[in-house]
Image (cartoon, helix red, strand yellow):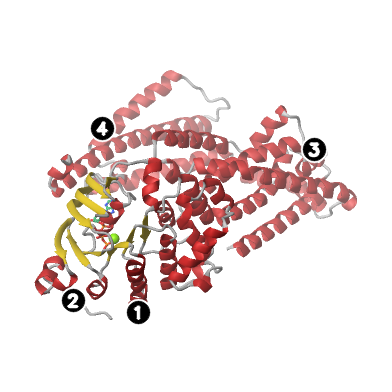
């Protein structure tokens, strides 16, 4: 016979039971968030506003003991505050008492948090209106801009060659990325992998690896690979390739996850095997999104290839870096114009192609 | 007996008890229609037969063999003998009508052959024959989503015919079609049932269609069978039992 204890509870009881449980979880979350809020406020007040602004210290004093004691204090305050059910977090998680006190604390403390964050941000960024409008600074900027607007076309052929190099770096990285991305994306699509434990583990591990790779900017990958394979276009290409695979695998697998299940069911109901189901029911639904992502990615990669050039990834970025180092602003001006033009053209072309596909 | 269901239960993960001990059997060549209110468990029943969902307990016998717990290759072989037609047609929209029909054959084609899509002439002939049966021979080369709803459903029927099914399941095959188209699509099911001798189990909503096409009727209510018999025996009283006191029959033609 069937065993199902849940069915024995009356639905109303079940709902109440769940609600109690949910309240408990929300309270725990509220306590933690309150502790965080209090600790954050104390630290910001102490370090940014008191040390940095009022005392104007260069080196902020740091001691583990102090930080720990402050944390302990925050824990005490946070817990007692949340227990009154009038704290900001209680309100955020919808478990606050509905009275005037809780309304006022929410308002006052909410604004307080916002204000100290903004003030601390101001102090940390060293916002200074004075230096923005100092005569010296304005003079320098004027010299720079007038040079930029008189580009030196003498280096046009060199710059053109470097530009082409950049476009090719992006193109090759995008093209090579396609087969591995395709393969990986099937293994990172939840709906295809959730069926048994082994495949779900593979899915999970792959996702973690991809997230990790993606969270490292292409610029940093370029630095890594310029040490690994030497400065130049190759390092730039591999950096882009790695990042492209990781990012597009995510987009691709999301496309796979959002396909219509109906056709998949229909094909598997005919007795087709798994490979056939994927090939005949999943693939036809995802070719176009895949194509569109890939073209868009080429566009992105051209821009990234430029940036990557700045740290030695080859192409126009490297050239820009060299002239900037020599303070030859008229040459820099030409390069900037060329980059802007190419980026604009790529943007236009890729948008048009993607439109045409759909 | 082509199909025997014994004491079938289905409890979904969220606790919904969708089938509560359903038992019945189907003889070869029958046109069995399942009726019942929305949510009474009709789809759940059909999907348990070809194992699109796993029944919680009970047994399904197909051609005398217990198929409730078979897996893998064995299950695939059984699935090739049971065709299924859905309310939403479930065609591959961007592919041609012909390749959609050939998809019905996948279970008996080799994996490699089906991936490079180089089929033998026999397969094509068969596909055209199935298209002819449902009367859309001339649409073979057009994209599936360029057809009307009724035509798409006929393609879906052709796809299941491609399996040479012993049993054809249809889950509200005409629920998203207008009355006139519904009738013409139902006529193809009738034709398949009469001329090819394929057993059909079909979920339907409209009693007028039921009376016209069913050779036998099963009515589900809240996961249990409340009526089994001839369509002509469903009188006012039975109707109210199945659909509730407030229900009134609407005539569609
Ligand atoms: N995947 C699912 N998970 C949880 N519950 C489900 C699921 N599918 C169906 N149910 C529930 O099971 C019950 C029976 O659903 P089923 O789809 O079989 O009914 P039906 O008779 O086909 O209805 P309809 O005429 O609307 O298609 C319903 O209460 C439904 O909410
Ligand atoms: Mg249904």
Real-space CA distance between mark 3 and mark 1, rounded to the nearest whole angstrom: 78 Å
Real-space CA distance between mark 3 and mark 4, rounded to the nearest whole angstrom: 58 Å
Provide residue A335's location: percent of width, then percent of height: 79, 49
Provide residue B113's location: percent of width, then percent of height: 56, 49
Secondary structure type for disc 1: helix
Please give left or right for residue A131 compared with residue B222 in the image: right
Secondary structure type for disc 4: helix
Real-space CA distance between mark 4 and mark 2, rounded to the nearest whole angstrom: 64 Å
| Chain to which the residue tagged by mark 4 belongs | A
Provide residue A212's location: percent of width, then percent of height: 54, 34
Disc 2, disc 1: CB below 8 Å? Answer: no
Q: Which residue is mark 2?
A: B249
| Chain to which the residue tagged by mark 3 belongs | A
Callout 4 crowding tier (Cα within 10 Å): few <14, some 14–19, many ≥20: some
Number of the front mark, 3 or 4: 3
Q: Quadrant of the N terminus of chain A?
A: top left
Callout 2 crowding tier (Cα within 10 Å): few <14, some 14–19, many ≥20: few
Image quarter for ligand 1 equals bottom left
Q: Quadrant of the C terminus of chain A?
A: bottom right
Between A114 and A50, the one lying in front of the other is: A114
Q: Which mark is residue A80?
A: 4
Secondary structure type for disc 2: loop
Residue A123 visible to the viewer: yes
The residue located at (39%, 22%) in the rendering is A68
Instruction: Looking at the image, tell me whether mark 3 or mark 4 is earlier in sequence order.
Output: 4
Secondary structure type for disc 3: helix
* Residue A14 image-quadrant placement: top left
């Amino acid at each position: 016979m069937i065993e199902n204890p849940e069915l024995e509870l009356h639905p109303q009881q079940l709902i109440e039971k769940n609600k109690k449980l949910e309240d408990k979880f929300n309270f725990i979350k509220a306590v933690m968030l309150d502790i965080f809020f209090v600790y954050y406020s104390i630290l910001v007040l102490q370090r940014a506003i008191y040390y940095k602004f009022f005392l104007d210290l260069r080196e902020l004093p740091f001691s583990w003991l102090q930080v720990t004691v402050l944390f302990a204090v925050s824990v005490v305050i946070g817990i007692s505050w949340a227990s009154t059910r009038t704290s900001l977090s209680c309100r955020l998680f919808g478990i606050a008492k509905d009275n005037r006190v809780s309304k006022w604390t929410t308002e006052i403390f909410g604004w307080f948090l916002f204000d100290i964050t903004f003030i601390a941000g101001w102090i940390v960024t060293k916002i200074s209106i004075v230096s923005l409008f100092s005569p010296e600074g304005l003079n320098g900027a004027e010299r720079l801009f007038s040079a930029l607007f008189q580009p030196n076309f003498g280096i046009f052929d060199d710059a053109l060659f470097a530009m082409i190099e950049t476009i090719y770096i992006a193109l090759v990285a995008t093209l090579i990325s396609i087969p591995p991305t395709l393969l990986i994306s099937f293994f990172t699509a939840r709906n295809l992998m959730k069926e048994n434990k082994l495949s779900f583990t593979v899915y999970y591990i792959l996702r973690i690896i991809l997230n990790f790779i993606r969270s490292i900017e292409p610029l940093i990958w370029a630095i890594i690979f310029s040490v690994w394979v030497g400065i130049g276009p190759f390092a730039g290409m591999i950096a882009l390739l790695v990042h492209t695979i990781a990012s597009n695998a995510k987009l691709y697998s999301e496309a796979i996850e959002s396909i219509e299940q109906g056709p998949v069911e229909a094909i598997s109901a005919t007795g087709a095997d798994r490979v056939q189901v994927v090939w005949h029911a999943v693939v036809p639904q995802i070719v176009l999104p895949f194509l569109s992502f890939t073209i868009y990615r080429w566009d992105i990669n051209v821009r990234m290839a430029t940036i990557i050039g700045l740290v030695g990834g080859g192409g126009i970025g490297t050239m820009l870096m060299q002239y900037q180092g020599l303070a030859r602003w008229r040459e820099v001006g030409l390069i900037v114009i060329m980059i802007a033009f190419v980026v604009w053209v790529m943007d236009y072309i890729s948008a048009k192609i993607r439109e045409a596909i759909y | 007996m082509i199909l025997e269901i014994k004491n079938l239960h289905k409890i979904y993960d969220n606790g919904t008890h969708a089938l509560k001990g359903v038992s019945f059997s189907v003889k070869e060549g029958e046109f069995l229609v399942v009726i019942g209110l929305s949510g009474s468990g009709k789809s759940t029943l059909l999907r348990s037969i070809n194992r699109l969902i796993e029944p919680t307990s009970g047994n399904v016998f197909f051609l005398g063999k217990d198929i409730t717990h078979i897996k893998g290759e064995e299950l695939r072989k059984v699935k090739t003998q049971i065709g299924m037609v859905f309310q939403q047609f479930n065609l591959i929209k961007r592919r041609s009508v012909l390749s959609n029909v050939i998809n019905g054959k996948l279970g008996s084609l080799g994996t490699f052959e089906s991936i490079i899509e180089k089929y033998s002439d026999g397969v094509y002939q068969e596909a055209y024959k199935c298209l002819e049966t449902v009367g859309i021979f001339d649409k073979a080369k057009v994209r599936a989503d360029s057809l009307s709803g009724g035509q798409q459903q006929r393609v879906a029927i052709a796809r299941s015919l491609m399996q040479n099914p012993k049993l054809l399941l249809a889950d509200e095959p005409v629920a998203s079609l207008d009355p006139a188209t519904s009738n013409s699509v139902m006529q193809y099911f009738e034709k398949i049932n009469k001329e090819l001798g394929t057993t059909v189990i079909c979920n339907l909503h409209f009693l007028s269609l039921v009376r016209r096409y069913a050779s036998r009727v099963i009515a589900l209510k809240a996961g249990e069978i409340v009526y089994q018999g001839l369509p002509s025996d469903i009188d006012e009283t039975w109707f109210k039992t199945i659909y509730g006191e407030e229900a009134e029959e609407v005539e569609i033609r």
